[in-house]
Image (cartoon, rainbow, N blue to C red):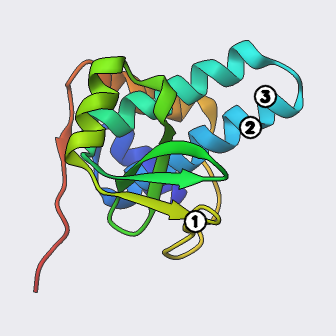
Amino acid sequence: MIKYIEHMIHHNEFDYETVELVLHSLNKIANDYLRKNDRDSASKFFKEKEFILESLFDPVEIHVVNGKKYISYEGEKHKYHEPFDHFSEVERVSFIKELPTKDLKEFPMEGPKIKGYLNEKICEEFYKMIKNDKFRFIPPRTS
């Protein structure tokens, strides 16, 4: 499956499964850098993940977990979170007005477990494809 996704990215195409694997991979890569105390590299990959989220998904809710607010995005099979304080004051006010807020004990872990991850080079290629607006989304097949 990973080879198929890499092939799609090389051809500037993606589907829901691809974007979910890229987001999962960017998060894993960033957390790996945090464990190595390389905050600059971790920040870079977290920012790329956030850019992809904001470019491809609409926020659906505000989640409050342990007193901290997050914007929640809903993918095809998974939910994603971005820290509320990463947005401008204008965006935060807009979110508060427009989105429902849910107090949660922990982040929702819905959907099937994502297996494997993509390497940094492939994630960078995907990020640049989205940033340069040079891609073709492949919608799911309907029966």
Q: Which residue is mark 2?
A: 31
Give the CA distance from mark 2 to mark 1.
Answer: 16 Å
- Give the mark nearer the N terminus: 2 vs 1: 2
Quadrant of the rendered image containing residue 90? top left
Give x and y (percent) for residue 41: 70, 18
Dot 1 amino acid type: Ile
Q: Secondary structure at mark 3?
A: helix
Give x and y (percent) for residue 129: 31, 27
Q: Secondary structure at mark 1?
A: loop
The reply to whether residue 121 is visible in this rendering is yes
Left/right placement of residue 98 relative to residue 117 reads: left
Q: Which residue is mark 3?
A: 33
Out of 112 and 89, give the one closest to the viewer. Answer: 89
Residue drawn at 59 percent across, 61 percent down: 107
Q: Which residue is mark 1?
A: 114
Give the CA distance from mark 3 to mark 1.
Answer: 20 Å
Out of 127 and 27, give the one closest to the viewer. Answer: 27
Give x and y (percent) for residue 57: 27, 45
Give the CA distance from mark 3 to mark 2.
Answer: 5 Å
Q: Tag on residue 93?
A: none
Give x and y (percent) for residue 28: 68, 44
